Image (cartoon, grey):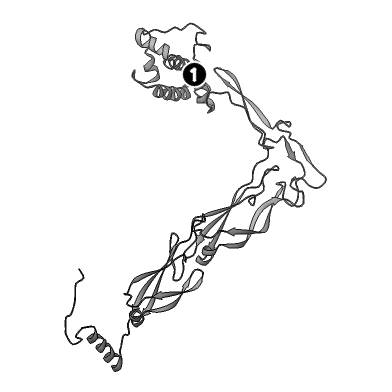
Amino acid sequence: MAEDLYKVLGVDRNASEAEIKKAYRQLARQYHPDVNKDPGAEAKFKEIQKAYGILSDAQKKANYDQFGVTDDQPGASGFGGFSAESMEDIFDTFFGGSGRRPGGAQRQGPRQGEDLRYDLELNLEDVAKGVAKELDIFHLEHCGTCSGSGSKAGSSKVTCSQCKGSGQIRTVQRTMLGNFSQVTTCHSCGGSGQVIKDPCPSCFGKGLEKKKKRIRVDVPAGVETGNKLRVSREGNYGENGGPAGDLYVFISVKEHDYFERHDHDIYLEIEVPFTQLILGTDVEIPTVDGHAMLKIPEGTQPSTILRLKGKGIPNLRGFGRGDQHVKVLATFPQKLSSKEKTLVEELAVLQGVDPKKKGIFSIKR
């Protein structure tokens, strides 16, 4: 009686395609002759291959499930009884690929330089009107001594002795399925095929050196903490003549002493003597643009919020501007002179309130 192929792979007869593939990969790694030198490992490996070659093929699997037999004629599957999918899985198992022969290493050409980050802190007044800032940055530029070549003056790059100028190293790996060539990038030259014989004494062969540079950045009005500005080509220069990276300016806005920002609106609290709330007045208050006059109508109640239209933060996209909201708080004297007390009592009487009566209160409905 033929051996149960499902038992060979250690899976249930109702196992899914993914479960069958996973079991095969684990067993193939365990019993491959190049890994397992125990007696019988090679025979076990062939048995595992045969089982998977059948169970991974939908037609063969259906025939096996129904009749318990398969067509084992040599060459029926195009490669020793294995389907094309089965062969891709073998490559995947031992070379980490996706079913294709290893290789295809490419030479290392020009590479773009790294992006840089600069953290810029602004105050609210800068945010309100926009500001130009001079930034001192350090980034990698082409070496001034060798003009970026990396070689000492009077010398030049030579052909890499490891890869003979090809930029690639070819190795042959022996498996039960035959010899397979694998191509990797040459570590000595990084794939360029050339190496620097006499390095530049300034940059030690890198072709780049760190330099300080002052650049101007125009910060638009309306930015907020977390916004970032991109300054093109002000990052590190690229290797092998590659383009420079970018500089990203990350914005943070300092907490203000008395303003609070909510989206595009500004909030401010001021204290005004209660007499001015009663009589009404004009007071000069700060704004993000300087100073402005705020009209307080007579009879204004404590904690009333008044609005100065258009005195907030501009929209970053240019769609209008927020407002400034001013919360008016009343201040009361802690002690009154006898004359002040008399005047307040007279006012209370005029308002229909008996200042001598105790426990006066009202509930607003």
* 182, above or below 73, in the image: below
Q: Which residue is mark 1?
A: 85
Residue 232 appears left or right of 223 = right
Left or right of 165: which side holds 19?
Answer: left
| Image quarter hosting the C terminus | bottom left
Q: Outermost residue toward the left?
A: 358
Would residue 163 appear left or right of 266 to someone viewing this image? right
Quadrant of the rendered image containing residue 193: top right
* Quadrant assignment for the N terminus: top left
Q: Is residue 110 above or below residue 237?
A: above
In front of the other: 278 or 246: 278
Measured as percent of width and height from the top left, residue 268 is found at 41, 70
**Residue drawn at (37%, 22%) of the image:** 16
Image location of residue 98, percent across then percent down: 52, 26
Residue 57: horizontal and vertical position, in percent?
Answer: 44, 15
Where residue 54 sits, quadrant-wise, is: top left
Which amino acid lies under the numbered mark 1 shown in the image of this protein? Glu
Mark 1, other Cα within 10 Å: few <14 / some 14–19 / many ≥20: few
Residue toward you, 32 or 220: 220
Residue at 60 percent of width and 62 percent of height: 132
Q: Work out whether residue 327 or residue 180 is closer to the camera in this orientation and state it.
A: 327
Q: How many marks?
A: 1
- Across and down, in percent, residue 233 comes to 64, 49
Q: Furthest-right residue in view?
A: 154
Q: Secondary structure at mark 1?
A: helix
Would you say 295 lies left or right of 193 here?
A: left
